[in-house]
């Protein structure tokens, strides 16, 4: 009896706390006309945004055998509708509809899948009753998909790619909050015209710059320039804008792209084997991103194989395996003399995307170089 009596106030406290949380969510919910950084409740509007959540797989759709399996589990098994249903708070902030496009680990994305996904997103963005898109995606290659969409979609409407580092079955699972935050960001008109965004771990990143930096930690996504903003307590807070052209500002249009040329990435290391260059050429690569050491340095024994590849018509693009910084044209190597290209600051996996798109437009090495400096 005594116990029950003591529990009662606690239960009441918990109830009122949950009610308070509900009220807070309602007040903080974004409305289509709300400014991103406006204090909660000042710009409320009745209409909820219509968001399509496209499922493609990854850990956010993963399940482990035990709650302690935070890093060992099966990815890409939970259907997108089930993921959405597991976060009922989402229905308070947006009208959402799930659509399963793939159920794969993101390492299995190839050009065909990338194009298929982007075309579907483009189609949905044209619908007047769609305000924004969220894509659930494996974290391994989220940065490549986001960059591709960032360069090829022709719409200002928000597109947010989201994943998680732990499956929903794990202790400390991060997918539910990441998905909630992604829907918040996609629903917020302040996210319009900012290019394709990536939301994880309370942060909003630009698809251009973000990259995965850790194999298991929830704090894995980073940009050398920092995030564009935060998502906190139901608020979307922007602090920066993307400086490079994206979406509607680019010359690449997914509706006009059905195939991408083959672009290979060759990683440089001490005692590397030049046969990797020959293999890329023989396989039909139109360009090789040479993921070089330091500022795009090329070992003395690698210069001739790269020049030979260029002589066969294959474009050579110097990148840096350091992960950040710009590769200086005519710095470590005489690019003008060899007719090579530098990536600017793009890491190899993003340079591959940009080069493949650039090659759909031009075969002029000078124009290709300009494209790297532009995007
Ligand atoms: N390798 C899987 C993928 O990228 C799981 C990793 C993750 O999503 O965090 O889809």
Image (cartoon, rainbow, N blue to C red):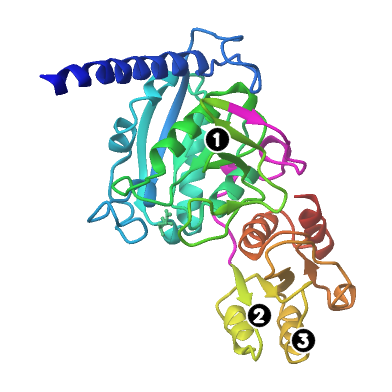
Q: Is residue 306 visible?
A: yes
Q: Is residue 126 visible?
A: no
Tell me where residue 355 appears, x and y as whole percent: 68, 60
Indicate whether residue 86 is drawn in magenta.
no
> What's the residue at 33%, 61% (across, down)?
72
Q: Secondary structure at mark 3?
A: helix
Report how far apart the C-alphas of labels 1 and 3 lie in the structure: 42 Å
The numbered mark, 1 or 3, whose residue comes first in the sequence reads 1
In the picture, the disc for residue 268 is 2
Outermost residue, left direction?
A: 1
User: Closest to the observer: 352 or 332?
Assistant: 332
For ligand 1, give the image quadrant: bottom left
The numbered mark, 2 or 1, whose residue comes first in the sequence reads 1
> What's the residue at 64%, 36% (across, down)?
229
Tell me where residue 145 appears, x and y as whole percent: 54, 50
The numbered mark, 2 or 3, whose residue comes first in the sequence reads 2
Residue holding disc 3 = 303
Q: Secondary structure at mark 2?
A: loop
**10 Å crowding of disc 2: few (<14), some (14-19), many (20+):** many
The reply to whether callout 2 and callout 3 are in contact (CB within 8 Å) is no
User: Closest to the observer: 52 or 84?
Assistant: 84
**10 Å crowding of disc 1: few (<14), some (14-19), many (20+):** many
Q: Which residues are magenta?
A: 236-262
Indicate whether residue 261 is drawn in magenta.
yes
> What's the residue at 49%, 51% (across, down)?
114
User: Closest to the observer: 330 or 174?
Assistant: 174
Quadrant position of residue 220: bottom right
Residue holding disc 1 = 159
Q: Secondary structure at mark 1?
A: strand
In this picture, is 65 found above or below 93? below
In the picture, the disc for residue 109 is none
């Amino acid at each position: 009896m005594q116990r029950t009596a003591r529990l009662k106030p606690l239960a009441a406290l918990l109830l009122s706390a949950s009610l308070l949380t509900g009220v807070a969510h309602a007040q903080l919910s974004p409305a289509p006309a709300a400014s991103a950084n406006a204090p909660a409740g000042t710009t409320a509007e009745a209409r909820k945004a219509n968001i399509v959540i496209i499922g493609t797989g990854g850990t956010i759709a993963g399940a482990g055998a035990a709650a302690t399996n935070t890093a060992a589990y099966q990815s890409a098994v939970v259907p997108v509708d089930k993921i959405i249903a597991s976060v009922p708070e989402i229905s308070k902030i947006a009208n959402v509809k799930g659509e399963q496009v793939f159920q794969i680990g993101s390492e299995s994305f190839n050009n065909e899948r990338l194009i298929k996904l982007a075309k579907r997103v483009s189609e949905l963005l044209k619908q007047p009753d769609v305000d924004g898109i969220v894509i659930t995606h494996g974290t391994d290659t989220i940065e490549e998909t986001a960059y591709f969409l960032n360069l090829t979609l022709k719409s200002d409407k928000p597109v947010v790619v989201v994943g998680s580092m732990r499956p929903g079955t794990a202790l400390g699972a991060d997918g539910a909050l990441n998905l909630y935050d992604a829907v918040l960001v996609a629903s917020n008109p302040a996210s319009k015209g900012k290019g394709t965004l990536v939301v994880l771990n309370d942060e909003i990143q630009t698809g251009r710059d973000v990259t995965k930096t850790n194999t298991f930690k929830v704090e894995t996504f980073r940009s050398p320039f920092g995030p564009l903003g935060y998502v906190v307590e139901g608020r979307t807070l922007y602090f920066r804008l993307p400086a490079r052209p994206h979406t509607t500002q680019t010359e690449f249009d997914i509706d006009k792209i059905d195939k991408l040329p083959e672009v290979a990435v060759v990683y440089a290391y001490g005692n590397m084997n030049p046969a990797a260059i020959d293999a890329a050429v023989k396989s039909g690569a139109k360009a090789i991103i040479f993921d070089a050491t330091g500022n795009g340095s090329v070992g003395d024994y690698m210069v001739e194989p790269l020049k030979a590849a260029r002589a066969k018509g294959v474009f050579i693009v110097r990148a840096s395996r350091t992960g950040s910084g710009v590769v200086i044209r005519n710095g470590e190597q005489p690019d003008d003399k060899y007719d090579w290209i530098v990536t600017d600051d793009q890491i190899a996996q993003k340079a591959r995307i940009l080069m493949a798109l650039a090659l759909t437009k031009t075969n002029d090495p000078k124009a290709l170089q300009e494209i790297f400096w532009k995007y």
